[in-house]
Amino acid sequence: MPIVDDLKKTLAEFPSVTANPEDLARLQQFFNQMRDIGIAKTREYDIPRPDTIGRVLVNTRRKAT
């Protein structure tokens, strides 16, 4: 999925452009700990892509006229 690839690329590049890569590592470690004990939860991306939303909207309007 292109969105996932873009996100992975951005996350991989972020520590090299941020002023405090240690803070990012600390935050990532904290998040992983919270996820492991069940406090933080992650969800799968389930929002339709914009081209899908647009296609449905166009088709719905065509049927209405």
Image: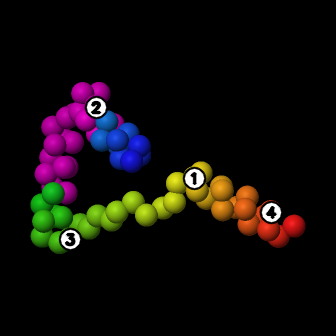
Q: Position of residue 62 (x, y in %)?
A: 80, 63
Q: Please tell me whether mark 2 sits on a helix, a strand or a loop.
A: helix
Q: Mark 4 points at which residue?
A: 62
- Amino acid carrying label 3: it is Ile
Q: Mark 1 points at which residue?
A: 50
- Amino acid carrying label 4: it is Arg
Choose mark 4 or mark 1, whichever is in front: 4
Q: Which of marks 2 and 3 is nearer the N terminus?
A: 2
Q: Position of residue 45 (x, y in %)?
A: 39, 60
Q: Name the residue under label 3.
A: 39
Q: Was residue 35 drawn as part of the magenta stretch in this picture?
A: no
Q: Please tell me whether mark 3 sits on a helix, a strand or a loop.
A: loop
Q: Please tell me whether mark 4 sits on a helix, a strand or a loop.
A: helix
- Amino acid carrying label 2: it is Glu
Which residue occupies 15% across, 57% down?
32
Query: Where on the picture, by quarter, is residue 64?
Result: bottom right
Q: Earlier in the sequence, mark 1 or mark 2?
A: 2
Q: How crowded is mark 4: few (under 14 residues within 10 Å), some or many (20 or more)?
A: few
Q: How crowded is mark 2: few (under 14 residues within 10 Å), some or many (20 or more)?
A: few
Which is more toward the observer, 2 or 47? 2
Q: Please tell me whether mark 1 sits on a helix, a strand or a loop.
A: helix
Q: Earlier in the sequence, mark 3 or mark 4?
A: 3
Q: Earlier in the sequence, mark 4 or mark 2?
A: 2
What is the span of residues highlighted in magenta in the rendered image?
Answer: 10-31
